[in-house]
Image: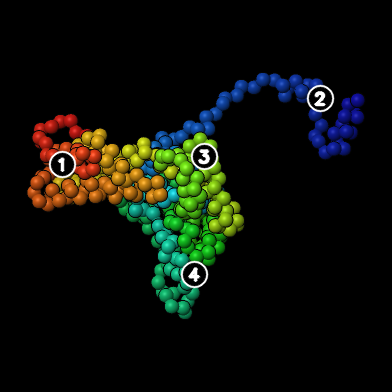
Amino acid sequence: MCPDALISHSSSIGLPYSPTTPIENARREAAPAERIRLRQSRLTGRTEALAQLLRRSVIGQSEALDQLLPVLARLDSGLRDPNRPLLTALLLGPTGVGKTETARALARGLFGRASCLTRIDCQEYAHGHELAKLIGSPPGYVGHRVEPLLSQRNLDAGHVKALECGTHDTVPAKEDDEGYLSILLFDEVEKAHPTLWNGLLHVLEEGELTLGDNSKTSFRRTILLMTSNVGSRELDRLAAPALGFGAALQDNAGSDARSAVLAAARESFPAEFLNRLDLQLVYGSLGREHLHRILDLQLDALSRRLMIAGAPLLVRLTRSARELIVDRGDDPRYGARPLRRAVETLLADPLASLLAAGELEAGDLVDVEAEGQLAEELAFFRGSRSAVEVVV
């Protein structure tokens, strides 16, 4: 083909004319170029610290927590959709396995306090007329002067409290941003009236909500989490023939359990609601090794309570004592909450009685052992205050 023909052909298909031949173009494209493989899993120091805090606070749910890490990257980079919430996620699974604790851990990591979030207990909104407490009543109706719970001021309250306590904003604000960074938790959302789900559709998609007085609340800088126990019965049926607390989420049973929970969610929630969510996370049952790690967290919390009460004690538990507490707190249906009750009943209450009766004083070393023929109760011994080795 002659050059004139090439020019004519290029013009006919709307391409700019190039004096190079197709062979030269092919050689140029085939020339090797230096490329560097990027590490997609690399996190910033602050994001890594927040991820570690989540894993320390929520035991046994690393697979679900790993799916939250991209939102932390969006927080650091600013690469977020300006017209939608930062994250919308539905946390599914049995009771007592760490769903609500995930929101509290995020609040601790971002604001320094677990209380710096807006928590909506959906059991209080089982009837349609109760939703007025969330969005307010129109002018002229009863209660229209009461500020709704989802007002912009209430949504921002946690972040404002954190700023007053000296912590800093973790998401750089833009000029067109409305409101502060916030965490909104709808706890046990399946127990709310379906009108709530319909009202959340615009929030999930557009990131804003119109209240009863026609004012608007922006959720575009909000991490919106919803917890649900939907699918717990399916997990119980899958775990019934197995021995062990966490057997339902091992090997193939794990994928079966997740599929059963997601199927139960599709039956319980409308498709247009689920389709607007960024994530649907399934939290698995806890194994006995997880309960031992949670026991350490409970003991740390008890130590802080003793410090606040002005009676710090150095508590040392033997292995048999730990096993007894875990045995009493091991219930597959209720997650880690029975363990918390076991710590209160077997450990905290006796220590409180001993302190009140003057048997123990601040700074004492307390040895806790399991005793009896079947090691069914705990015995407390006061040790020497000069002891150095202490296991809390």
Mark 1, secondary structure of its residue:
strand
Q: Which residue occupies 33% across, 49% down? A: 338
Q: Which residue occupies 48% across, 40% down? A: 249
Residue 23 or residue 41, whichever sits in front = 41
Task: Report the mark closest to the observer, 4 or 1.
Answer: 1
Q: What's the distance in space between the residues labelled 3 and 4, CA to CA?
A: 38 Å
Q: Is residue 169 above or below residue 140?
A: above
Q: Earlier in the sequence, mark 3 or mark 1?
A: 3
Please give left or right for residue 319 compared with residue 139 in the image. left
Q: Which residue occupies 40% across, 72% down? A: 146
Mark 3, secondary structure of its residue:
helix
The amino acid beneath tag 2 is Pro
Please give left or right for residue 24 compared with residue 43 in the image. right
Q: Mark 1 packing: few (<14 Cα in 10 Å), some, or many (20+)?
A: some
Q: What's the distance in space between the residues labelled 4 and 2, CA to CA?
A: 69 Å
Which residue corresponds to mark 4? 128
Q: Which residue occupies 82% across, 23% down? A: 21
Which residue corresponds to mark 1? 380
Contact between labelled residues 1 and 3, with CB atoms less than 8 Å apart: no
Q: What's the distance in space between the residues labelled 3 and 1, CA to CA?
A: 42 Å
The amino acid beneath tag 4 is Gly
Task: Report the mark closest to the observer, 2 or 1.
Answer: 1
Residue 352 or residue 287, whichever sits in front = 287
Q: Mark 2 packing: few (<14 Cα in 10 Å), some, or many (20+)?
A: few
Q: Position of residue 169 (x, y in %)?
A: 40, 48
Q: What's the distance in space between the residues labelled 2 and 1, CA to CA?
A: 88 Å
Which residue corresponds to mark 2? 22
Q: Position of residue 304 (x, y in %)?
A: 23, 45
Q: Earlier in the sequence, mark 3 or mark 4?
A: 4
